[in-house]
């Protein structure tokens, strides 16, 4: 939450966050270290972002947060 608040403070109007999908995969961090999309959305809203977009990439998830 603190990192997103700081990102919101220093950004003009958008912040991008790359995260591993919340699923078991051969590569990447263990599932317990990954964030659920709903958790990212909740943290984004709590830190002052009003827009939330999830874009599924080949191996990662891109979250676009906006003010």
Image: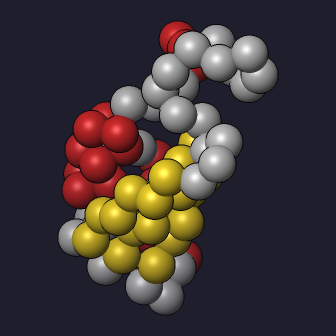
**In the depicted view, which residue is nearer to us: 52 or 10?**
52
Q: Camera-side residue: 32 or 26?
A: 26
Up/down of 9 relative to 24, above or below: below
Identify the image's colour scheme: rainbow, by chain, secondary structure or one colour. secondary structure
The quarter holding residue 25 reads: top right
Of residues 38 and 46, the one drawn nearer to the viewer in this rendering: 38
**What count of labels does the image hold?**
0
Q: Residue at x 46, y 59 (%)?
A: 55
Q: Is residue 15 something that shows in the picture?
A: yes
Whole-percent x and y of residue 49? Answer: 29, 67
Q: Residue 33 at x, y = what percent?
A: 57, 19
Figure quadrant of the N terminus:
top left
Could you tell whether 6 is left or right of 53 in the image? Answer: right
Residue 6 in view of the camera: no
User: Residue 32: where, in percent of width, then height?
Assistant: 52, 11
From this view, report whether residue 29 is shown above or below residue 37: above
**Residue displayed at 46% across by 47% down:** 2
Asked where in the image residue 57 lies, by quadrant, the reply is bottom right
Residue 7 spot, x, y in % from top left: 52, 65
Quarter of the image that includes the C terminus: bottom left
Residue at image point 22% right, 70% down = 50
Residue farthest front in this picture: 58
- Residue at x-position 35% and y-position 39%: 37
Q: Which residue lies furthest to the right in this view?
A: 27
> Residue pushed farthest bottom?
12
Q: In this view, does 41 lie to the left or right of 21?
A: left
């Amino acid at each position: 939450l603190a990192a997103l608040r700081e990102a919101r403070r220093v950004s003009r109007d958008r912040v991008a966050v790359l995260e591993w999908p919340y699923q078991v995969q051969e590569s990447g961090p263990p599932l317990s270290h990954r964030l659920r999309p709903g958790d990212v959305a909740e943290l984004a809203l709590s830190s002052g972002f009003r827009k939330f977009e999830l874009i599924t990439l080949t191996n990662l998830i891109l979250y676009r947060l906006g003010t």
